[in-house]
Image (cartoon, coloured by chain):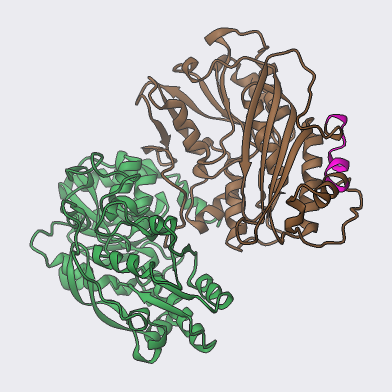
Chain colours: A green, B brown
Amino acid sequence: MLYNSYFKNPKDVPLLLEKIEKYTEQTGPVRLMEICGTHTMAIARSGIRSILPDNVQLLSGPGCPVCVTPANMIDMILDLSQRPGVLITSYGDLLRVPGSAQGDCLLARRAGGGKVESVYSPMDALKIAEEHPETEVVFLGVGFETTAPGTAACILEAASRKLNNFSVLCLLKRTEPAIRSLIESDDFAVNGFLCPGHVAAIIGADGFSFLPDDYRLPGVVSGFEPGDLLYSILELIEMLAHGIPELKNEYTRLVRQSGNPAALALMEQVFCPAPSDWRGLGLIEDSGYAIREQYAPWDAVKKFSLAPAGEKEIPGCRCAQVIRGVLRPAECPLFKKLCSPDNPVGPCMVSGEGACAAAYQYE
Amino acid sequence: MEDRIIESRTTDDRITLDYGSGGLKTSELIESILLPAFDNDTLASLGDGAVLDGSQKLVFSTDSFVVSPWKFPGGDIGRLSVCGTVNDLCMAGGIPKYLSLSFILEEGFPFSDFKSIVSSIADEAKEAGVSIVTGDTKVVDSGKGDGIYINTAGIGFQRAVLPGKSAIRPGDAVLISGSIGCHGAAVMMARSGLLREDSPLVSDCQPLHQISAAALEAAGMTARASGSSAPVRILRDPTRGGVATTLNEFTEQMPFSIELDQSALPIDPAVETACDILGLDPLYCACEGRMLAVCDPETAGDILDAMRKIPGGENAAQIGTVTENMPGKVLLKTPIGGRRILAKLSGIQLPRIC
């Protein structure tokens, strides 16, 4: 971890900034998008925007797993939390996300008597199920490829222990189809991508080579410390200045070109690609993971016959545009007026990784 | 640790509802466990209330403790229940003297754990120089409590008059008595079962009577009010919400801002690592034995020197300055030279997905 301190506190900031400035003289205004909630927060917390030249704009894409979950899915989860004998277990982020009604979230349902627990790992949820055989424990499998292997391992473990009171509501998403959909949309105006280091640790840096190969867009797989981010931004701008888009890997201390084969094997065993609904992007083919038929007894959708109903978007909420990088948080008419972290209207404000929460808290 | 618990007559190994009945078992608990542990005449008289000596201005505070797990690296709920109230008194410029102590126990709570908690309360009270002079015990049905809850209230004599946040002015120094966020990080790691026994990550839980006394003496402050020109403007222990939230309470609605220098923050590498793992920010993690002071820049050096001589104050540091750049806000200068707002904690800190 001390190795990390080099990236936390980089010594050569002035030099990096000087180079960024030099290259932007050649490129003109540059719009770079990050597609990972942890990057959103890391950028905001490092204060990087305040030191970059004005013509470098950093945008947040659909990288916050909570933010891209449609409102009707949240409503479905809220309904499930009211069923007798059901205990919902979830990563903390999701607990405050409102469904279609403002203020209605898992924390509110818990205060109203619903059974909801926050966990760090799906294995914690499995443990709760083992200790409470009379309770139906449902784990909310939210996230991208980063959290998918852990969720897969957990389903395999439940199967091997024949734990019949445990199931996973699989809302996992795949990054590539969403990024492709974003790039192919009419209002797309981004010059390069900071690629998510955590996702790449699983799928490999090669998982993002479609950016230069198919779209002639540069991408840099980046770590999360200020040094990582500054260096990756420099690499993107340098590639734009030279007109040679490539996929580079800045996060070599964690990310291999071909990813983590053990994790990928687990995911392949348990999940298959499936169409998935994204807030802001709509239904995208193959952009989600579904639990394979073989593991149906641990699939909450099948176990509880779940189907989302009602509105996917919250009326008046502009999170959909924010998620696509079309609208900056401050440009939303609700921002800091009707919508704040204490009283969020949309998911971008509530999630710790949301673009609006980051802008509200740090800028 | 000195074990001052006299062998109790009870053969029960768990707390039962009988111990909250007010009858024989309650008396047994008081007489065989609590009185010997806290050993003082005021308590021993077992009146409905304590009669206390004193002819000075008083400071008075109360706090409740519900921490889970009740035992954490570097302390337990007993130790915390003394430090919490003692520190509140110290931050109000008081010399802590007397504490009340109330337990709410859950039926089934192990007796051995209860005794161990009482023992650490006794040790901590001795260290902080306070007497437990009155108290109460209730037992609730199994499932209606989280093992043990404690409330303490405390009375102290006023040592110095602190003018408060209205006396803070641009140029003032912001000091902290030691490393940031140890308690919150240690409890969160213990709660998630990630803490090994040999981990260097321990709570900072400690009484601040010596550190606050040293700071106020170094600043030459006494119980005679010196108005808004007093060199120490305000003292606070940044418990829930951490340093970031406490500093925001200073700046809210005020015509000044506080600017912190991230590179100057004393943060233990173990805390930093734990926060990296859990997705937390040390600036929002509770401290239970740290003091924030805003003071006149002229006396800041003397106050820091004085704090550093006290055990637990070795890492005291100036972490920021009061400015007029963005009134009402707390700002953080990051190591790469960026600047951002440090907001108040919104709701509870929840672990993030990845």
User: Is residue B306 visible in the rendered structure shown here?
Assistant: no
Q: Is residue A269 above or below residue B282?
A: below
- Image quadrant containing the C terminus of chain A: top left
Residue B343 within the magenta-colored segment of the rendering: no
**Could you tell me what secondary structure mostly forms the magenta stretch?**
helix
In percent of width and height, residue B184 lies at 58, 48
User: Is residue B324 visible in the rendered structure shown here?
Assistant: yes
Residue B34 within the magenta-colored segment of the rendering: yes
Magenta-highlighted residues: B32-42
In percent of width and height, residue A98 lies at 30, 56
The image quarter containing residue A39 is bottom left
Q: Residue at x 29, y 46 (%)?
A: A19
In percent of width and height, residue B162 lies at 59, 17
- Image check: B252 left or right of B113? left
- Image quadrant containing the N terminus of chain A: bottom right
Q: Is residue B194 above or below residue B349?
A: below
Q: Residue at x 79, y 47 (%)?
A: B118
- Image check: B120 left or right of B184? right
